Amino acid sequence: MNTINTNLSVKIGNPKISIGIPIYNGEKFLTSTIESILKQTFVDFEIIISNNASTDKTSDICKKFTSIDSRIKYFNQSKNIGMLNNYSFVLEKAKGKYFMWIAADDLLSGKDYLSKMLKKFNDNIDYAFPEVNIIDDKDNVIHAKLMLPFHNAKTRFDFALASIKNNSQIFYGLFKTSIIRDDYYLLEMFKNLDCYGEGYFVHVISVERKGVCVQDACKLYRRHTNMQSTSVPAYLRVYYFVKYAVASLNYFYQNKYFSRYQKFEIIIRMLVRILPYFIRLMISMIAQKFPKINKLRRKFFIK
């Protein structure tokens, strides 16, 4: 295990930031994720881990870390409570003024990540989110600057358009805890969806809350074959995506903040974005039924 920051000057029981790690069978990358947090120069935080009845060595890894750092709070669910309930659980346990989730396979890039994020807050800012790079299972960057659409966003309209191009990563930003608790119902609206539900959440808070992109802080989002979302059958992914898309289009259509022209532009851009993706999902669903088609799909559509 690498050298980590175990500064004990933290106010016990009253941290500035709460970091939630909801996890299920995440032994492969969990150690790296926790270490990336413990290396931070800003030390006034707590880590809340909820192990959703994992069957691998997740529990052993968590217990090892709790023995070396009192800021880590570990909870082991006796049975699987579902993904969304696990996210809700760590949020409910949070004591900090600010809160963020981090997936058990992602990393905070740089030791000043938390301090850079925190500095952007004032009375008018509800949440801050970092630049995001996609990495593979060996930590190689395979896609950089995922949040580029947000770099110059200033108005509600700017944020709405940017959220169409990237509708998920803001979910893992740093929020005022009171704000994320108030807005959690947006996620519960899609509690029966195993994916895409966070997209609606991002659209709404992009418009109705005040956020800021912290371009000099970077989160590393890991893409690998064992991701939880990849286990969802293609036919369910199609269903979940349609539910998300219809709800999001309806939200923008009825939005009180935008003119008719702005609504038209938002909806057209969203349709341009979602239709090709929907076609890819349909091809994926068909390919799962027919092996020959699947071989062609992998040859021509998967890079």
Image (spheres, rainbow, N blue to C red):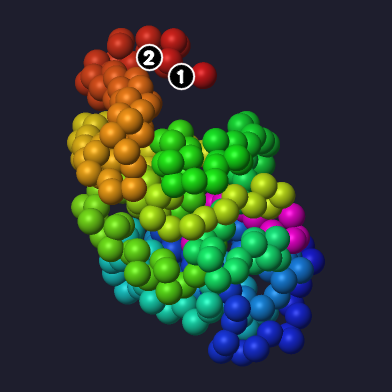
> Please, is residue 299 above or below residue 231 in the view?
above
**Few, some or many residues within 10 Å of mark 1 (<14, 14–19, 20+):** few
Q: Residue furthest bottom?
A: 12
Amino acid type, label 1? Ile
- Label 2: which secondary element: helix
The tally of labels here is 2
For mark 1, what is the residue? 302
Residue nearer the viewer, 160 or 148: 160
For mark 2, what is the residue? 297
Residue 8: give x, y in percent of width and height: 73, 85
Of the numbered discs 2 and 1, the one sitting upstream in the chain is: 2
Residue nearer the viewer, 277 or 251: 251
Residue at screen point 29% across, 41% down: 252
Residue 63 in sight here: no
Residue 199 in sight here: yes
Residue 100: give x, y in percent of width and height: 51, 64
Residue 72: give x, y in percent of width and height: 58, 77
Judge from the rendering whether residue 65 lies leftward or rightward of residue 190; answer left or right. Answer: right
